[in-house]
Structure formats: C-alpha cells, structure tokens
Image (cartoon, rainbow, N blue to C red):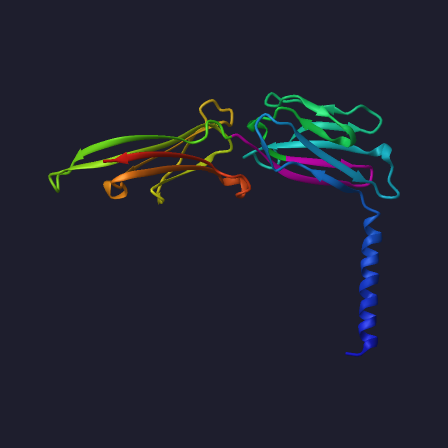
Amino acid sequence: MSIRTIKSKALLRACFLLLCFIAGTWELSITKFEVPPLIELGKDADLSCQYELADDDDESSVVVKWFWTPALSPSYDKILIYQRISGRAPMTFRRRIFGPIDIKENDTISLMSIHPLSSGVYECGVSSYKEDARKNETLTVISGGTGPVIKLNEIIEDSTETKKKNELLKIECSAEDVAPPPNLGVSINGHNVKTVTFIEDVNHDALYKATANVIVSGDHILNGDNEVKCEMSFFQTNDTVLPWVAITKFVVI
C-alpha cells in the first residue's frame, strides 16, 4: 500500500468524523442524565436531566418530563411525575407511594426519603417542536432490614433402618423488612448447604420477609467448635453491594 493511499484513507476518515460531529450539533440531545442505580431506604435520590437544543430550535417550545415505571411493571405503564413547559412553572405529580418530590435547578428533581415502592425505571424526556430525546435508567431501593438472623434447633429422630437415634440440626436463617427480594445462603463449618429462599411481601409494601430452612445431619457437625454462617445478598445489584452476614457458633461435647 502506498503512502498516498494511506493519507487518502486518513483524510476520508477525518472528513467522516467531522461530518458526524457537525450533524450531531443539529440534534436535540440530553447531555447529562443521572439516576442512582442503587440507593438506601430513607435517603434522597437526585435525578438529573440536562439537554442541548439544535441550533435552529427554540427554547420556548421545550417540554421536559420525568416518568416512572414501577419495578416489575410493563414498560408502557409509565407514570408522569414531573413536567416543565417553557414559560410555565414546573410541576410535580405525586402518587400515593411517593414521599415529597423536591424541584431543583435545571430539571433536577429529588425523591425525598425514598421507599422501596419507588424502585423502577426513571425516564427523562425532552421535546421541542421539531424532535425529542429520551434516556432512562433503573433505580433500586435497598433495605438491609433486620439483616440475617440465625436460629438453631436440635432434632432427634429414630432411624427404622439402624434402630438408632439420629441427631440432626435444623438451621433457620431469616430476615425481615428487606428490599429488594434477597437470597439467603447457609454454610456450616465452611461448607455451603443447599437452601431455598422463601420470600413473602406480607404488607404489600415491597419490604420482604425472607426465610431459608435447612436440616443437616451429624456428618456436618464436628466435636468441639462449630460455626454456622448465613449470608444475605441481592440478585439485582450485580455484586456492587456487600452481603450482610450473620455468624453463630456452638460447641459439641
């Protein structure tokens, strides 16, 4: 390949990038969009949406809206929670599950004392006479609740096969007022035990009760010191939140 060919291709590429840049300046675009992916129960969540108009567009035609789609709801089930029409004062539309919504500068809103019922997808839409732009992000409200709590119960049962009594240990790990639905993992003396987590939303308030029960045989129990661990983690947080851990120790003589 000749030097002239290389230079020609480089020039064409530079021209293409320049045209893309010029074209981009003629479009309405959202230049800053921030929705916290995770936030703790009771804290304030700031949602930011800033935009840039096309050169031939007019600020007087702009409408900015914030929508909320509840968690586990279909995407078309959007609820309008904020609207600003140019020339008018911005408005918020509170729903029963929301706490106060505070209006800040540049179409930023703050969801005050946020609750797990407010988890879901938040979308900002900016429109003018000519075009519109939208961005969305999922927000998940986290509550550790009581954290994992361990209860141990000894079970003695008769074995019809060996004619002996078997000593079993029932391990119960539970947590209340937790969000989102957690997973509970149990281990004894460093060995993971297969468990199934049962989830209940008793009060229908997105604060869950989780329970995991497991019965282990004497093969898992050591003479002397033993350790039972229960770890609570969340499926929806991509391991960005450290798990809650409870540890109980007991001695077998």
- The answer, for residue 207, to whether it is visible in the render is yes
Would residue 78 be visible to someone looking at this image? no
| Residue 82 location (% of width, % of height) | 71, 27
Q: In the drawing, does residue 11 fall left or right of residue 230? A: right
Residue furthest bottom in the image: 2
Nearer the observer, 93 or 37 = 37
Residue 107: x and y in percent read: 76, 31
Give, as a single range, the part of the protein colored magenta.
122-143
Q: Position of residue 32 (x, y in %)?
A: 74, 40
Is 128 magenta? The answer is yes
Please tell me in which quadrant of the rendered image residue 66 appears. top right
Image quadrant occupied by the N terminus: bottom right
Is residue 85 part of the magenta span, yes or no?
no
Quadrant including the C terminus: top left
Q: Which secondary structure dominates the residues rendered in magenta?
A: strand
The number of discs equals 0
- For image coordinates 44% across by 24% down, the residue present is 202
Residue located at (23% from left, 32% from top): 155
